[in-house]
Amino acid sequence: MTSPRNAALEYALENQEKFLNSLKDLVRIPSVSTAPEHKADMLIASHWLMERLESLGFATRLIETEGHPLVFAERTIDPAFQTVLIYGHYDVQPAEPLDLWLSPPFDPEVRDDCLFGRGASDMKGQVIACMSAVESILKTTGLNVNLKWLIEGEEEIGSPSLTPVLEEYKELLESDIVLNTDSGMIARNTPTITYGLRGLAYFELRVFGPQSDLHSGIFGGVVHNPAQALCELIAGMHDEKGRVTLPGYYDPVIPVSEKEHKQLAESPLDEDFYLKQMGVNELWGEEGYIPAERIGARPTLEINGLYSGFTGQGSKTVIPSWAMAKISMRLVPNQDPAEVQQQLVKYLQTHAPNTIHWELTPMAGAPASLLNTSLPASEALADALEKAWGKKTVYKREGGSIPIVYHMQTILGSDSILSGFGLPDDSVHAPNEKLDLPTWYTGIEALIHFLFNMQDLEK
């Protein structure tokens, strides 16, 4: 007699094409959260998800916000069972520049065992993987696990509406664990759990000089060019060892322990890995740390954008009146975005010359998160990944930020476990975003194992 677990796995194998078609349907909806012209598409995507969940027997509701709505769904059987809250987001990044796509971004196309389209990996593919795993179980047997869903539409713009929703609907969203698949794998066939997320502090710095643009021939040599002054300030934000020079920046940073250093050193995230990923001649970063530590366990400061003066074709001999830089800092546990802002202000007060004046605008901020890998649910996920791939699960610290994890810890009191089936070369946020389908299908199997593992856990 076929066991419930095997029956669900067989269903998943037999319905791969159906699951892929569902993903294609969702990718076709251009749910770009940052673009006002796509507001109607955001609503279409949210209703599509509600209908999909309702077809699986979930009670659904649309949670309206000042921005884009969230989809909530629930299937509660017995409060004595484990309750898993599955998090996801249905919004995507803009697809521009369109001319770099080999196929239309919202007309998904399969090439070389990959599905190409905006959102295929980040994170519509991950949302549909979770739904496909749940369908495979519920259509063949049953599951003694209470399931809830929270799928937002503003993750790609910083989730401005999410914190108020968590506070208002705290009781509704109560769970034993949050499953968040908005992460990814270190490499193909390397199942991965993310246990650390860096925080974020993001700023716009503007430097002002003369009251208007000046002729560089007439005024060059008597005025401090704001573009040059900005570059000088930026250059001073790192020393010759790659360390950030903001006063007190490293004071609260927890050193990497010997145990964690050994664990990270054994991961595939070595120098060769990053050289192949980025196509650069050699790596750069804080002296004294291996790449896996610099990418997740140490804080950084990066320049995300620069603008000043004339940038069109041809020449225009001008001294610009102002210059601008976008600056982001990836933070580690114990660093506070508000304190980091004050450190940046102090640096500018100390180093900015009297020849210019400056303005600093905070754009976004979120603390870092460090997750407990010894939680029973985390062990259940690690076991599930190993069952699906036949390989030991690798643990990593993520260099990026997922603020929802911190907010769910502090507001809901719920820990998260993070994984996902995207790959480093999926080109998320870039042209030709893709999802590796063999990896995705195996990921669905892993999620089936995880849900059955959760069923076996005692409350």
Image (tube, rainbow, N blue to C red):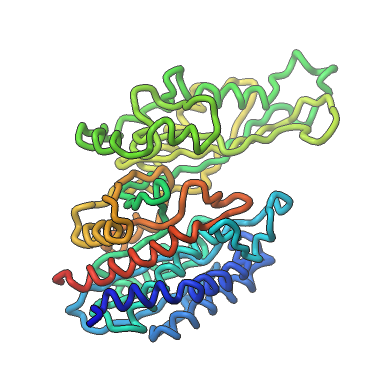
Q: Position of residue 163 (x, y in %)?
A: 41, 62
Q: Residue at (56%, 61%) from the top-left corner?
A: 115
In the rendered view, would you say 6 is above or below 219? Answer: below
Q: Quadrant of residue 66?
A: bottom right
Q: Position of residue 83 (x, y in %)?
A: 26, 73
Could you tell me which quadrant the N terminus lies in? bottom left
Q: Residue at (43%, 64%) from the top-left corner?
A: 441
In the rendered view, would you say 279 is above or below 350? Answer: below
| Depth order, front residue of 127/191 | 191
The residue positioned farthest toward the top in the image shown: 221
| Depth order, front residue of 102/264 | 102
Q: Quadrant of residue 138?
A: bottom left
Residue 62 in sight = yes
Residue 410 in sight = no
Q: Residue at (53%, 47%) from the top-left corner?
A: 363
The residue positioned farthest toward the left in the image shown: 458
Count of picture labels: 0
Taking 148 as reference, is 432 left or right? right
Q: Residue at (23%, 52%) from the top-left corner?
A: 372
Q: Quadrant of residue 81?
A: bottom left
Taking 298 as reference, is 144 left or right? left
Q: Position of residue 106 (x, y in %)?
A: 65, 64
| Depth order, front residue of 348/25 | 25
In the rendered view, would you say 193 is above or below 238? Answer: below
Could you tell me which quadrant the C terminus lies in? bottom left
In the rendered view, would you say 351 is above or below 431? Answer: above
Q: Position of residue 200 (x, y in %)?
A: 44, 44
